[in-house]
Image (cartoon, rainbow, N blue to C red):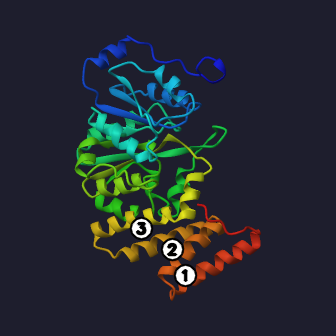
Amino acid sequence: MPGGGRPAVAPPRRGGLWWRVVSAAAPRVSVVVPNYNYAALLPERMRSILAQTRRDFEVILLDDASTDDSVAVLEQYVDPPRVRLVRNAENGGNPFRQWARGIALARGAYVWMAEADDSADPRLLARCAGVLDAHPNVGLVHCAFRRLDARGVAEDLSGVWWRDLDAERWRRDHVAPGAEELRWLACWNVISSASGVVFRRAVYDAAGGVDPSFRLAGDWDLWVRMARLADVGFVAEPLNLWRWHGGSVRATAARSGEEQREVERVLAGLARASGAAPETLLASYHRRHAESALRWRNAPLARKHAAALLRRRPLDGDTWRILLRSGLLLARTGLRPSRAG
């Protein structure tokens, strides 16, 4: 451990009653934990997994050639066959390659992608997997979330995430047809954090699995393809603790144009599923984001999406209205346009 101290969370006791009982049968749920250089956060992540009230799960720990003390931390939790560690000799350079590898190793009928830097309420697995148990036509279930800031302080922002789309829909538990969910997924990735999703392995396989050529939007693309095949469940209680970082990877991707290319790929897939024109979906996507950013007084983000909209709808009056409003907001707040966000 860093500094030679004891781990912040003790590893599970080998041979306990639960461990012996669960080891006697195939797990219902596979918890996949992809990690790269999150040694400091892994104890909290592991505590939140091992504290789950639903116990019929295995844990697959993945380390993508971390350069910190991650492996030393993870090794404390290894207890075959229920907790396994798989190490990459070289970094894969793409989180979705790790997803694919972990899911390929999974033995459970359900999969929970528990990202290493996030955390969870002890009831997340019971509530989300319970929806899959009760509804055989549901392919994935996601839940509301609380945001963890850099200090580890949790704040419930899940209502904000969806409010600009529908003020009521995500305030209550529901199961929706996949076709209905696709309409919302055309707006943005309404299935928020991957750590708040539990999905059915059979539907994942039928959808073709995660596409490792994505760097940022591989989860969004996967949810779209799964929603084409199955219903989608939602648990309104904020059971996922989603840690938000500075966004350097996304900022770099925005500057290089990679973020926009991935958005276009996802929406092209949605267009094929719905019969809509890809350019129509793209224009709607940028208009929604620009208008939402203006409501939240985020002038740089509004300007970014308005500029993308201008390239597609240069003669649209709404486009120029959004550009003007974002420019006025920039002038009032004294902010420079930003390419991040």
Of residue 169 and residue 165, the one placed in the foreground of this image is: 165
Q: Which residue has dot 2 on it? A: 287
Considering only vertical position in the picture, is 67 above or below 143? above
Of pointers 1 and 3, the one earlier in the residue sequence = 3
> Does dot 3 land on a helix, a strand or a loop?
helix
- Given residues 121 and 81, the one toward you in this image is 81
Please name the residue that numbered disc 1 is placed on.
319
The disc, 2 or 3, on the residue closer to the chain's N-terminal end is: 3
Residue type (three-letter) at the residue carrying disc 2: Arg
The crowding category of the residue bearing disc 2, from other C-alpha atoms within 10 Å (few below 14, some 14 to 19, many at least 20), is: many
Task: Describe residue 141's horizontal placement relative to residue 65 as left or right.
Answer: left
Q: Residues within 10 Å of mark 3 (few under 14, many from 20)?
A: some
- The residue depicted at 63 percent of the width and 43 percent of the height is 149
Mark identifier at residue 264: 3
Q: Is residue 64 visible?
A: yes
Tell me the kind of residue under disc 1: Thr
Determine whether the residue tagged by mark 2 lies in a helix, strand or loop: helix
**Circle 2 or circle 3, nearest the eye:** 3
Q: Position of residue 69 (x, y in %)?
A: 56, 27
C-alpha separation, residue under disc 2 versus residue under disc 1: 8 Å
Q: Is residue 307 left or right of residue 213?
A: right
Residue 7 lies, in percent from the top left, at 58, 20
Quarter of the N terminus within the rendering = top right
The span from disc 1 to disc 3 (Cα, nearest Å) is 19 Å
> Are the residues flagged by discs 2 and 1 in contact, CB closer than 8 Å?
yes
Quadrant where the C terminus lies? bottom right
Q: Earlier in the sequence, mark 2 or mark 1?
A: 2
Is any atom of residue 235 visible in this view?
no
Residue at point 46%, 70% (across, down): 285
Q: Name which residue type carries label 3.
A: Glu
